[in-house]
Image: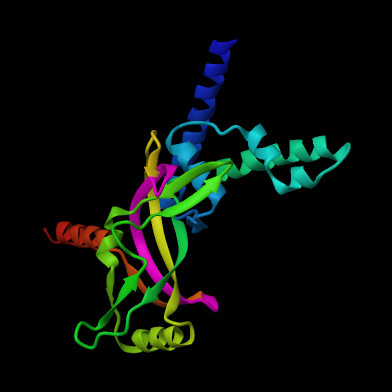
Amino acid sequence: MKKNGFFVLVITFAMAFAFLQAGAAQAQWGTGAPKDRVATPMSVATLYHILQQQLPDFSAWARETPAYKNASGFDKNVVYQDEVARLKSEFQLITPFEPLVIKTRVRLSRYSEQTKGYLLEGVSPETFFSYTFMGVNYAIVLPKLTSYEWIGVEGPQQEAVESAAARTHRTLGFHIKIRVNYADKNPVVMKGKPYLLLSGNILSLELYDVKDPDKPLWWLDSKEIGDAAQQKLMQLKR
């Protein structure tokens, strides 16, 4: 029985990763575009399991959902089955190829006319983004985020950012688009709690008015993306 169970697990992951590769190829050929998925406790936990090639305990996850906990009587078993099916479906939809958007907030320094930019309070070598799902703590760590403790902003963007900052005690929404590519197997203790770590590449950063989270005031492609584009351009010129 154990051998059969292991075989099923291998086949399941083989199918899952074939699905992921097909999705990546589809996006490459323009038949589908990756959507930006917001980092939530479930999406982060799911990505961790995918990168570790571990199937989650969907039964346990289903029993912790609000729908199951709020169900009663004979409905409870029906809701349980529905929740297991929903979680499995959502698990298949999340891939490490699509961007993940971390939504947080930062506080801006006063604008520097000398350097033409701002310091971001909330971005430091100790910064990490924590999520708890099913009693397990996950943390996204971005070592290269410290490259953006200072951001340059000029012209109309600076005017829009300064106007929003003046209305919100200099606090703005900060969205970091990343592509997760690493998950550590062993937990690490940070601030007195054990965390399972994930990391990845920064794709872009955006500042938002906290009262209008749909329209960015400032945006910037990451240095990694810019460097990659520059390298491709140089190769084409050779």
In the displayed image of the protein, which residue is found farthest to the front? Answer: 192
Q: Which of 167 and 52 is in front in this view?
A: 167
Q: Which residue is drawn at 50% across and 50% down?
A: 131
Task: Find out whether residue 208 is within the magenta segment.
Answer: yes
In the displayed image of the protein, which residue is found farthest to the right? Answer: 73
Q: Is residue 87 at all visible to an observer of this figure?
A: yes
Quadrant position of residue 172:
bottom left
Q: Which of 86 and 121 is in front in this view?
A: 121
186 is higher (above) or lower (below) than 173: above
In the picture provided, is 192 more to the left or to the right than 57? left
172 is higher (above) or lower (below) than 128: below
Q: How is the image coloured?
A: rainbow
Q: Which residue is drawn at 59% across and 41% down?
A: 134
Q: Does the magenta stretch mainly form a helix, a strand or a loop?
A: strand
In the picture provided, is 72 more to the left or to the right than 118? right
In the displayed image of the protein, which residue is found farthest to the left? Answer: 238
Q: Position of residue 182 (x, y in %)?
A: 36, 42
Magenta part of the protein: which range? 190-213
Q: Residue at x 27, y 61 (%)?
A: 146
Q: Which of 22 and 183 is in front in this view?
A: 183
Quadrant position of residue 84:
top right
